[in-house]
Image (cartoon, coloured by chain):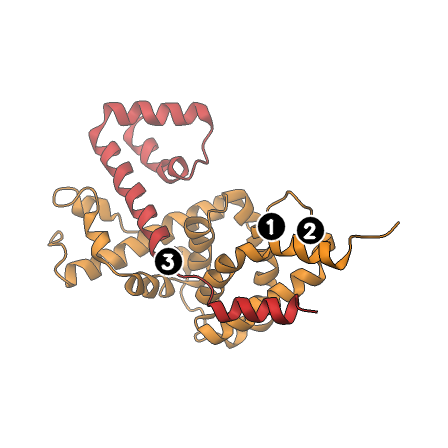
Chain colours: A red, B orange
């Protein structure tokens, strides 16, 4: 696997959408190539960051109460 | 033969569906763009889901099922009065590889940690509709490419390319913000 192929599949790798065989190839490439390995770490950090920032938000307590009361209350 | 009792039905709905309320609300907020509409959309979704609860197959992905109901409700009733029409040709946007710009200075992306929630949400809200929806379903709610493709009724390849572009576009926005705030020097063009 070369750098171009590796970067093309990087998000699929991080999203666990590749077959185990291709995952092995990806990991082997990261061992050999610092730059792609670094980029994988960077993208992984970015995805974790987006998830954490967005997940800090949840439904307001009042909405939950309203649904429980009105929908399931009868 | 009789069906499940009202109590059983209610109990299974609470256990399987109501636990996804936060997820529904997060996505509803990004779809509608305001808290009042998000509230209404989530209530309507829960009502529809409860009425159709017999159609849900226990053991399958309840979150995906609920998000699909919500998406249909949104398209039918909210999209047309959303705050702005979609004017961007999503396929014409060039992705921007931020890593190359920070590789020397901050290869681990530590500058992201200095950007607060509101700024990230604002940047996500600035993405074209199709990108924002795909990004939320994947990166925040953890749905697979296949699940998203089914929900949006597009090929898996489209999900893949939207995600690629959405992520790079979001990165580019956040990078430019971080440079403007002095969190990072950035690379001079």
- Seen at 60% across and 50% down, the residue is B62
Depth check: give the residue in front, B118 or B124: B118
Residue that carries the numbered disc 2 in the rendered image: B56
- Seen at 43% across and 51% down, the residue is B162
- Seen at 56% across and 52% down, the residue is B63
Q: Are marks 1 and 2 in contact (CB under 8 Å)?
A: yes
Depth check: give the residue in front, A2 or B142: B142
- Seen at 81% across and 52% down, the residue is B3
Residue that carries the numbered disc 1 in the rendered image: B62
Q: Residues within 10 Å of mark 3 (few under 14, many from 20)?
A: few
User: Does residue B86 lie above or below B110 as drawn?
Assistant: below
Instruction: Tell me the mark number nearer the camera, choosing from 3 and 2.
Output: 3
Q: Earlier in the sequence, mark 1 or mark 2?
A: 2
Q: CA distance from mark 3 to mark 1?
A: 21 Å
Residue that carries the numbered disc 3 in the rendered image: A56
Q: Chain of mark 2?
A: B
């Amino acid at each position: 696997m070369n750098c171009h192929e590796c970067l093309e599949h990087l998000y699929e790798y991080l999203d666990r959408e590749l077959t185990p065989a291709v995952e092995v190839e990806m990991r082997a490439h990261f061992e050999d190539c610092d730059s792609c390995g670094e980029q994988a770490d960077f993208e992984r950090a970015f995805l974790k960051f987006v998830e954490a920032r967005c997940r800090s938000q949840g439904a307001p307590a009042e909405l939950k109460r309203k649904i429980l009361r009105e929908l399931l209350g009868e | 033969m009789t069906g499940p009792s009202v109590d059983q039905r209610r109990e299974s709905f609470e256990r399987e569906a109501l636990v996804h309320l936060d997820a529904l609300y997060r996505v509803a907020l990004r779809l509608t763009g305001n808290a009042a509409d998000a509230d209404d959309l989530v209530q309507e979704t829960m009502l529809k889901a409860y009425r159709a609860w017999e159609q849900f197959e226990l053991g399958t992905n309840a979150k995906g099922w609920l998000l699909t109901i919500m998406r249909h409700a949104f398209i039918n009733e909210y999209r047309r009065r959303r705050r702005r029409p979609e004017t961007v040709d999503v396929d014409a946007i060039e992705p921007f590889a931020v890593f190359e710009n920070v590789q020397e200075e901050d290869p681990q992306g530590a500058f992201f940690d200095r950007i607060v929630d509101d700024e990230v949400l604002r940047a996500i809200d600035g993405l074209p509709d199709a990108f924002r929806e795909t990004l939320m379903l994947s990166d925040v709610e953890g749905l697979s490419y296949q699940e998203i493709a089914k929900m949006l009724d597009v090929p898996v390849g489209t999900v893949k390319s939207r995600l690629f572009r959405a992520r790079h576009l979001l990165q580019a926005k956040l990078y430019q913000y971080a440079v403007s705030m002095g969190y990072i020097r950035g690379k001079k063009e």
